[in-house]
Image (cartoon, rainbow, N blue to C red):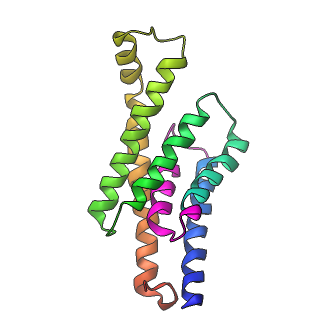
Amino acid sequence: MKQQTQARLLLATALVVLGTLMRIAPHPWNLTPIGAVALFSGASFERKRWSFAMPLVALFLSDIVIGFHSLMPVVYATFALTVVMGMLIKRVSPASVAAGAFASATLFYIVTNFAMWTISAIYPKTLAGLVACYVAAIPFYGTMLAGDLLYSALLFGTFAWAERRLPMFAAR
């Protein structure tokens, strides 16, 4: 039983590390695995501290390479909320994973663009300025949603495949 738990932890950790490396690789804006990593971590790690640590440490390590910016606290908080979304997935299925990925991308879009509107001199602090900020971010929402759906399918799918095909990863 202990070996099985360790094997599952190792597989989940390897998938998270791979996802992190994909964030560093060249990609279209917001087409990254971090939202999926956060969702997967919340759903896959039994220990809550691992659920939060894995995607947030992955995000931080990749930010060291990519660079830091003023919205980082908001971005990190949003991904922490995505971990919580993953914890709320009681039964992993294609529908629950797709719903989680959709919710994750939508949460990120709403929260980070509101934060951008509040700190940016580009947008006036009016309702029209807020709407303009959200409208300008629609293309980024599309790529974020595509990335969350794609990488969630890969992470959850690979893990489910390993559980079914390889006895050392089978669910308890």
Going 67% across and 47% down the picture, which residue do you hit? 60
| Viewer can see residue 31 | no
Question: Quick one: 15 or 27, which is closer to the camera?
Answer: 15
Q: In this picture, is 62 found above or below 71?
A: below
Q: In this picture, is 3 found above or below 142?
A: below
Percent position of residue 74, x then y: 54, 35
Question: Quick one: 38 or 52, which is closer to the camera?
Answer: 52
- Is 43 a magenta residue? yes
Percent position of residue 131, x then y: 34, 17
Q: In this picture, is 164 found above or below 159?
A: below
Going 30% across and 61% down the picture, which residue do you hit? 96
Among the 4 quarters of the image, the one containing residue 10: bottom right
Residue interval drawn in magenta:
25-50
Going 57% across and 55% down the picture, which residue do you hit? 55
Percent position of residue 78, x then y: 49, 42
Q: In this picture, is 30 found above or below 125?
A: below
- Is 163 a magenta residue? no
Tally of numbered tags:
0
Quadrant assignment for the N terminus: bottom right
Horizontal side, residue 102 vs residue 125: left or right:
left
Question: Quick one: 9 or 77, which is closer to the camera?
Answer: 77
